[in-house]
Amino acid sequence: MDSFDFYAEPSETSATAELLVVATYFDQDLIGSTGTMLHGFYASGQLWALLIGVVLGYTFKSMFSYG
């Protein structure tokens, strides 16, 4: 992450109120970070736990529901 310097300048005074806006710009690659997250989800085995949970949940629902 790039370092940045923060300089708080006093806001201009107006007749109604003072407003100080502090913002930081983040340059994020949303598609790239999603791919990294999904790879970690797969590599840790959580994907298989999700699929097994969905199958078992549907099976139990079907076995114990009436009609």
Image (tube, rainbow, N blue to C red):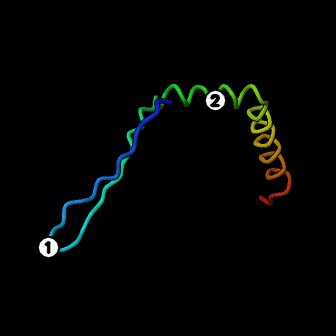
Q: Nearer the viewer, residue 12 or 53?
A: 12
Q: Quadrant of residue 27?
A: top left
For this orientation, the residue located farthest to the left is: 15
Q: Amino acid at mark 1?
A: Ala
Which labelled disc corresponds to residue 44?
none
For this orientation, the residue located farthest to the bottom is: 16
Q: Is residue 51 left or right of residue 11?
A: right
- Residue 26 screen position, x and y as percent: 42, 37
Is residue 66 depicted above or below 25 in this figure?
Answer: below
Is residue 17 depicted above or below 12 in this figure?
Answer: below
Q: Nearer the viewer, residue 48 or 16?
A: 16
Which residue: 22% across, 72% down?
17
Q: Secondary structure at mark 1?
A: loop
Which residue: 77% across, 30% down?
44
Q: Is residue 67 left or right of residue 30?
A: right
Quarter that holds the C terminus: bottom right
Residue annotated with mark 1: 15
Q: Nearer the viewer, residue 33 or 7?
A: 7
Q: Residues within 10 Å of mark 1 (few under 14, many from 20)?
A: few
Q: Amino acid at mark 2?
A: Leu
Which labelled disc corresponds to residue 38?
2
Q: Quadrant of residue 38?
A: top right
